[in-house]
Amino acid sequence: MKSQEETLEDWCRALLQAFELEDVEVDVNEVLALAGVAAHSVVRPAAPLTTFIAGFAAGMASGSGQAPDSVSMQAALGVARALAMDYASDSPADPAGSGSLPTDAATGPSVSTGNTGA
């Protein structure tokens, strides 16, 4: 019988293959850690929502050429983790919170990858 870790790795590979993304590296433990932060800092259902949106943001950054896959994923996971951690500490008097991210009306939160496009 497979361990949970082996099952998740197999599932991740199957998903990547189904979406023709075999060359993409996914740090399953990092994604699960983000889900845990979101579940405990926001509300439990925030876990899948947070990981989906972080993945979508990483895909958009990679697809548009803003940064390579690994940089895009790390940046998106970092932004989502920081936002979730700050969410729990936001005071009612400051709904945006001190950890609010710059936004663009068309794309939402800005994800800085450190890539200057050069």
Image (cartoon, helix red, strand yellow):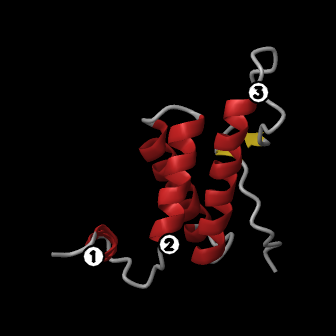
Q: Position of residue 112 (x, y in %)?
A: 77, 60
User: Is residue 59 placed above or below 45 in the rendered structure?
Assistant: below
The residue sitting at the top extreme is 93
Q: Position of residue 54 (x, y in %)?
A: 55, 54
Q: Identify the mark nearer the N-term, 3 or 1.
A: 1
Taking the spot 43% from the left edge, 85% from the top edge, the residue there is 23
Splitting the image into 4 quarters, where does residue 8 fall?
bottom left
Query: Which amino acid type corresponds to the residue marked 2 in the rendered image?
Result: Asp
Query: Which amino acid type corresponds to the residue marked 1 in the rendered image?
Result: Asp
Mark 3 vs mark 1: give the one in front. Answer: 1
Q: Residues within 10 Å of mark 1 (few under 14, many from 20)?
A: few
Task: List the residue tagged with mark 3.
Answer: 96
Q: Mark 2 touching mark 1, by CB under 8 A?
A: no
Number of numbered tags placed on the structure image? 3
Taking the spot 71% from the left edge, 55% from the top edge, the residue there is 111
Q: Residues within 10 Å of mark 2 (few under 14, many from 20)?
A: some
Taking the spot 53% from the left edge, 57% from the top edge, the residue there is 33
Mark 3 vs mark 2: give the one in front. Answer: 2
Task: List the residue tagged with mark 1.
Answer: 10
Q: Image quadrant for the C terminus?
A: bottom right
Q: Secondary structure at mark 2?
A: loop
Q: Secondary structure at mark 3?
A: loop
Q: Residues within 10 Å of mark 3 (few under 14, many from 20)?
A: few
Q: Image quadrant for the N terminus?
A: bottom left
Splitting the image into 4 quarters, where does residue 66 fall?
bottom right
Task: List the residue tagged with mark 2.
Answer: 27
Distance, label 3 to label 1, CA atoms, is 39 Å
Distance, label 3 to label 2, CA atoms, is 30 Å
Taking the spot 57% from the left edge, 56% from the top edge, the residue there is 57
User: Is residue 37 placed above or below 27 in the rendered structure?
Assistant: above
Q: Position of residue 46 (x, y in %)?
A: 48, 38
